[in-house]
Image (spheres, rainbow, N blue to C red):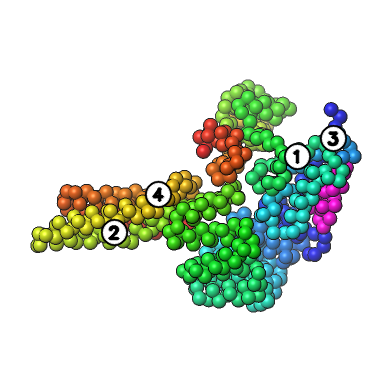
């Protein structure tokens, strides 16, 4: 499909101009004439993936591979669809095949890196990304893949370096700027991170990443998920110990006050520089995620309020609902992960 | 007014001129200039003049550059050529296309209001056998429906009446009940657009270019 007036090129241009529906129609019309064209099927897989029809995209890629088993692009696109369907092992196998078929092409290695990173195999992912980069040292996509897998591996300095190199080549890269913003988020550079995320959203306002812009709220809740229940449990244990050792009562109240103050301080540290943006974006995120986040926030506020109440009154019964709330917090987190 | 009318969309451009799109875009503008006064209508301008920063293909970027050149009319001048463009996604249009002297005036076309909906329904029912239809009630029940949605409602109601006629063997008119049922069946298609428009009003309105959209969304409590 290399002619000047071929449907493949037309469909590719249409997809690039954001006309995914037109591109799909063009491809389906062409496939009606040539149902075994592996290039057209691979492009159809890409277009369907962009339209979030992941099962359809996978079917198109399977057909492409059946038509052209040696087409590396088809395997790479299949790996992308499998990643979208969270089938990590299959995605890795497909990406490995893409890299095997075209070892000198960086694309297969980069897809493999992301598939491995998605499965938590960070060392292998970093090696694959570095290999892809070695094949195309000035490639923005390769640099950003390196940045992505380094970030997922927790190596923020390396991730930042690669992202900045990519942005030096393409300062407008939305993904590069997003990556830097998320690296800032992980370092609690709240204002800078949100300003960058807002700028990325401004450049493409029809498709803002509203979930990323809620990170201050969600990160705060994630951080509290582990240690707030532990803090409540510790206060309860010390309070219980007061039955045998009276001075423990005062210590438990002091601990409760201290923990409540730490939570409040941490919340202020994150939420004040964040301003209203995360809360406004929270209204725009998908309903299940919004409900779980609000549920977790309400639970945390209730637990802190109960800690405060205990610190002021010393009534041990107040700690019981706080202890009951702890598994609720964990359960909501599990629901959020499942929804994702 | 006797002006000629030329229309094109990206599908036409790519279908006819892939590989030499820029030259042929130039030819099209030349044709418009030759037929002046002429209205040149660019449909779905977000595809033809997509933001270059979001395009990876140099061919597509060159096409946008050529469109800019033609709009400036450096070679031939555009006297007598009135360029109109339509889009559902003005936020995807390259900013350079909207600078003074090019497509420098934007008109927000909102979904039809109640009187307009009644008129649209009347238009689509004008050649159909209807009886006892209350257009005002229907118009009130179709808030948020686009013109195409209303056409679909009329089509669906006609299908109900026809299906019923075939089942009973007795021809009957399209009634208010058919239309009310069709309204329940056909939901407005504008929801996704409004969700996107809300994002644009929130994140992309720093220069105030979407103030009228934001005001409309606020009025409808969507913002």
Residue corresponding to mark 3: B80
Q: Is residue A236 left or right of residue A219?
A: left
Q: Is residue A257 left or right of residue B50?
A: left
Q: Is residue B133 left or right of residue A212?
A: right
Q: Secondary structure at mark 2?
A: helix
Q: Secondary structure at mark 4?
A: helix
Residue corresponding to mark 2: A229
Whether residue A99 appears in magenta in the rendering, the answer is no
Find the magenta span and give its range.
Answer: B12-31
* Residue A69 appearing in the image: no
**Residue pictured at 49% horizontal, 73% vertical:** A121
Residue corresponding to mark 4: A272
Which one is in front in this view, the residue at disc 1 or the one at disc 2?
A: 1
Which one is in front in this view, the residue at disc 3 or the one at disc 4?
A: 4
Marks 1/3 same chain: yes
What is the x, y in percent for residue A153?
A: 48, 70
Marks 1/4 same chain: no
Which one is in front in this view, the residue at disc 1 or the one at disc 3?
A: 1
């Amino acid at each position: 499909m290399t002619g000047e007036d071929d449907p493949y090129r037309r469909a590719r241009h249409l997809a690039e101009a954001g006309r995914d529906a037109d591109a799909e129609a063009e491809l389906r019309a062409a496939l009606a004439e040539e149902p075994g064209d592996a290039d057209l099927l691979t492009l159809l897989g890409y277009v369907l993936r962009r339209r979030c029809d992941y099962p359809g995209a996978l079917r198109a890629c399977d057909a492409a591979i059946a038509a052209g088993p040696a087409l590396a692009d088809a395997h790479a696109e299949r790996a992308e669809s499998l990643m979208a369907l969270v089938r990590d092992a299959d995605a890795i196998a497909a990406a490995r095949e893409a890299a095997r078929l075209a070892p000198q092409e960086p694309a297969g290695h980069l897809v493999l890196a992301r598939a491995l990173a998605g499965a938590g195999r960070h060392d292998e992912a970093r090696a694959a990304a570095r290999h892809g980069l070695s094949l195309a040292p000035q490639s923005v996509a390769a640099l950003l893949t390196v940045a992505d897998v380094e970030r997922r591996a927790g190596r923020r300095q390396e991730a930042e370096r690669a992202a900045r190199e990519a942005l030096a080549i393409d300062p407008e890269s939305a993904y590069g700027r997003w990556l830097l913003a998320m690296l800032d988020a992980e370092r609690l550079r709240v204002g800078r991170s949100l300003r960058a995320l807002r700028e990325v959203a401004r450049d493409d306002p029809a498709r803002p990443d509203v979930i990323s812009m809620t990170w201050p709220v969600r990160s705060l809740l994630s951080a509290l998920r582990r240690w707030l229940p532990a803090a409540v449990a510790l206060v309860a244990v010390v309070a219980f110990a007061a039955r045998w050792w009276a001075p423990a009562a005062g210590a438990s109240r002091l601990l409760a006050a201290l923990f409540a103050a730490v939570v409040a301080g941490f919340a202020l540290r994150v939420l004040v520089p964040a301003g209203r943006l995360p809360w406004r974006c929270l209204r725009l995120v998908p309903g299940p995620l919004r409900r779980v986040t609000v549920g977790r926030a309400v639970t945390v506020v209730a637990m802190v309020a109960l800690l405060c109440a205990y610190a002021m009154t010393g009534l041990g019964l107040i700690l019981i609902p706080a202890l009951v709330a702890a598994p609720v917090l964990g359960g909501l987190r599990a629901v959020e992960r499942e929804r994702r | 007014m006797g002006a000629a009318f030329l229309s094109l969309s990206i599908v036409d451009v790519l279908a006819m001129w892939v590989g030499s799109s820029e030259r042929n875009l130039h030819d099209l503008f030349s044709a418009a200039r030759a037929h002046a006064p002429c209205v040149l209508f660019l449909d779905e301008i977000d595809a033809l003049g997509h933001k270059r920063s979001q395009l990876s293909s140099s061919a597509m970027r060159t096409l946008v550059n050529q469109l800019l050149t033609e709009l400036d009319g450096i070679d031939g001048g555009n006297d007598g050529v009135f360029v109109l463009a339509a889009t559902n996604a003005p936020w995807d249009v390259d900013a350079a296309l909207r600078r003074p002297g090019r497509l420098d005036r934007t008109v927000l076309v909102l979904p039809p209001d109640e009187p307009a909906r009644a008129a649209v329904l009347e238009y689509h029912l004008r050649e159909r056998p209807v009886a006892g239809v209350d257009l005002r009630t229907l118009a009130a029940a179709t808030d948020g429906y686009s013109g195409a949605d209303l056409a679909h409602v009329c089509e669906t109601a006609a299908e109900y009446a026809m299906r019923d006629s075939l089942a009973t063997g007795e021809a009957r008119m399209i009634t208010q009940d058919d239309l009310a049922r069709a309204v329940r069946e056909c939901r407005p298609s504008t929801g996704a657009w409004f969700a996107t428009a809300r994002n644009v009003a929130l994140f992309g309105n720093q220069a105030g270019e979407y103030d009228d959209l934001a005001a409309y969304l606020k009025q409808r409590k969507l913002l």
